[in-house]
Image: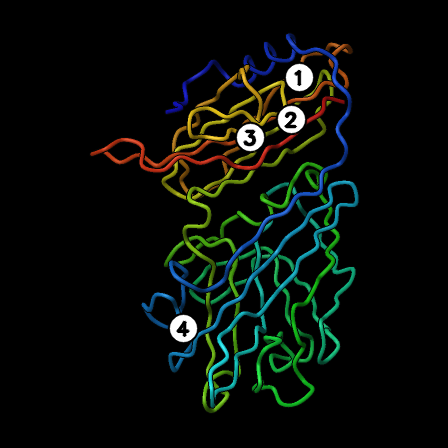
Amino acid sequence: MLHPRTSASPSLVLATLLAALQLAPAPAAQVTTASLRIGGIDAVGCQGADDPPTLTGGVPASAELDLAYDQAALRLTLTVTNTSAVLPGQATPLLTRLFLNLPPGAITGATLAGQTAAGGATPDFALALGARRAGCMGSFELELHPRSGGLHGIANAAATWNGGGAGSAVVGPVVFAIDLSGPGAANVNARALAYGFSENGPLAPLNAGAKFQAGGASADESGWIGSDTRPDDCATSMWVLGDPRVGGQITFCRNGLRGCHDCLWISLLPGPTQIAEYLVPIGFPLVAVIDSDVFTGLPRCVTYDIPNDPALSGLRLYFVIVTFEQNPLDGITAFSFGDVFTLRIL
């Protein structure tokens, strides 16, 4: 079993670590991916306590979100697939509003650069930023919605009856190209965009949420359904604010599912490394481990000083968040790794 350990202060750890590094080639810009599920077992709904959650009238609804983020182009490609069950004699609900989170402080702007669909009506969605309320699921930073109203939402390609009427629905999957901007746009990945959490929701902080409409036997059932509340065990995200330049400062931010214990592992080697039954996604030996205790549902950010040494320019570090849940009766009950985050000193 691998166990995290407590280290010295973050700035001292980074200074000691960088002083020991050797020159490494600059990494290529990353294209990272992540996925989310809306609906299904362990998801949240605003229409009652059903598991999996349903719309009014007990109508099932679900969707899948696939995110790909190109760090060089600062572009998020978001693919939305309506996977709602197709039932005889019932209209399959349309996905009419979609909500995502953005890494706080890292992304301050988003522009919808393109949208394409598999068929049906031409997609004409608008993007809105800010505290976007989504029923009982709390507030999210980004919303997508059709300009012409809910009946022009995203349909399941397998549906035989869409409540919006012939020709009004957009047949999924729908692909949105979203250009991001902000002080951390070049240092986030798809996981940071997928695994943020909504705020001020009475039920649970969620990674994503959706409004579904026009379902059921009368094509008038609707409701709010959110993402899985336990995605990928202790789902975590990481991002950086500021340019990692010699003599400067950077701020590392991390977020994760409430109640999960968080450690940051740092290596000079890309990995992966097999340790007993675990495939650790970075190399060994580790050069630093920072134990940050338990996630509370809010991002955790720490500022690091980078030594003013020109010889450090071009050096590369590999980071991974390691999480586990603690049970007072039997100790560690779940142990998981986030994606690797690569950082090059400028």
Which is closer to the viewer, label 2 or label 4? 4
- For mark 3, what is the residue? 281
Tell me the residue at 47%/72% (across/down).
61
Tell me the residue at 76%/10% (across/down).
311
- For mark 2, what is the residue? 250
- Tag 1's secondary structure? loop
Q: At which x and y percent is residue 39?
A: 45, 64
- For mark 1, what is the residue? 306
Q: Earlier in the sequence, mark 3 or mark 1?
A: 3
Q: Earlier in the sequence, mark 2 or mark 1?
A: 2
User: What separation in Å lies between label 3 and label 1 (alpha carbons)?
Assistant: 25 Å
Q: Amino acid at mark 2?
A: Ile
Which is closer to the viewer, label 4 or label 1? 4
Give left or right: position of 264 versus 23.
left
Q: Earlier in the sequence, mark 2 or mark 3?
A: 2
User: What separation in Å lies between label 4 and label 1 (alpha carbons)?
Assistant: 51 Å
* Mark linked to residue 54: 4
- Tag 3's secondary structure? loop
Give left or right: position of 157 versus 87.
right
